[in-house]
Amino acid sequence: MSPVHTTSSWGVPLVLLGLLHGCSTIRPNEGITVGRAWEEPPSPPAGARPHTAASGSEPKPASASSPGTGAVIAVVDGHDITRDRLIELLIRGHGVGVLEQIIVLEAAQREAATRGLKVGEAEVSAEYDGALRRLLSPLPAEEEGPLNREEGERVLERILSSRNISRAEYVLGMRRNAYLRKIVAHEMHFTEEQLKAEYGRAYGERVKVRHIQVATLAEAERVGKLLAADDADFAEVARRYSANPNTAAAGGVLRIFARDDEDVPALMRTTAFALEPGRISAPLRIGEWYHVLKVEERYPPERSAFAEVRAELEKQLRERLTEPAMQQLHQTLLQQAQVEILDPVLAEEYQRKHRQPTP
């Protein structure tokens, strides 16, 4: 088979795109953990003048009377390790990323409240389950089966470990995403032009593809050797070796997709439409997984009356545009937030990250 082709981390949930840090403590002066940060925002000490990170002024020194900052939390070969030493390193390495997640969550909660929107625990759980499902099956299966939670948790744990993201941060991200999704759904409306453009996209030339999803290039190459045999059955190899629980049982078949279907990674679309029916692709790396494709059939453009499929078009458009809209809202809320930071180390790191480049 030909050398592997690669593309970006498509299919990774929004929370993993924003969470790049693994610290669970953001304010050494107050001991607020990420897991609790969404419950009640900390109040500044009485009489303190908050530092505004965006102002460029000098940060206010931390209070010497802050409880616990000098406490010994470990002893290494007879030498004391203090809490403030550890926390300063954690803040410098991870504090800004964690703070940004909390900033967006706080802002999203306020935005939702102004619109009269509420997010319950069921919606947060649904966000978590949806993220697990996308980690396991980042491609649009022909039929969506039940969530394999045990396998999903294993994949999630591997990704969190490799990216140094804590469970507490991930759960916070799920809550933030639930609020972002709620706001986006409330605000999302489509024009007639958008629906007609979606009609053209959905009913143009399409292709039916089977795939085999594996975790490593070595596994993809092994699959390729199996498929090279004269009597190889792609569907049977997919059932035996594909790591995608939603598609493996169906022999690796994916939902039929169009050339410009943005639910499918660009590399996969380009590859599929370049192959003749019956041909098998080289391994493709897409996000966390490797894929081998086989084109089953190509379909000419379909002509259905616009009025008859209007509701389905709106549903497809909503599903396709929700994630990008959530990412845009995330950035907007972060940029518009008035950030006040009391801790001098965190303020310094925040300013360093958000400092505007000199023209």
Image: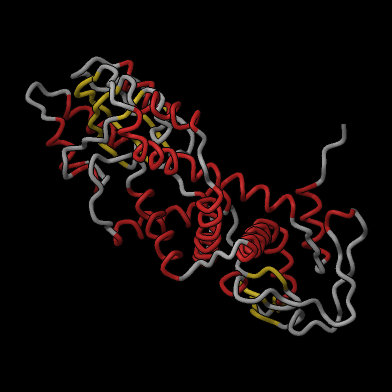
Farthest residue in the right direction? 57
Q: In the image, residue 164 lies at what x, y percent? A: 54, 56
- The answer to whether residue 310 is left or right of residue 83 is left
Q: Which residue is drawn at 60% across and 75% down?
A: 39
- The answer to whether residue 15 is left or right of residue 299 is right
Q: In the image, residue 248 lies at what x, y percent? A: 20, 43
- The answer to whether residue 357 is left or right of residue 238 is right
Q: Which residue is drawn at 34% across and 32% down?
A: 307
Vertical placement of residue 276 versus 266, above or below: above
Q: In the image, residue 212 lies at what x, y percent? A: 25, 36
Q: Which of 174 and 239 is in front in this view?
A: 174
Dividing the picture into quadrants, the one containing residue 107 is bottom right
Dividing the picture into quadrants, the one containing residue 325 is top right
Farthest residue in the front direction? 307
Q: Can residue 102 be seen in this view?
A: no
Instruction: Tally the numbered discs.
Output: 0
Vertical placement of residue 355 versus 129, above or below: above
Q: In the image, residue 151 lies at what x, y percent? A: 30, 57
- The answer to whether residue 267 is left or right of residue 22 is left
Vertical placement of residue 68 versus 143, above or below: below
Q: Nearer the viewer, residue 136 or 221?
A: 136
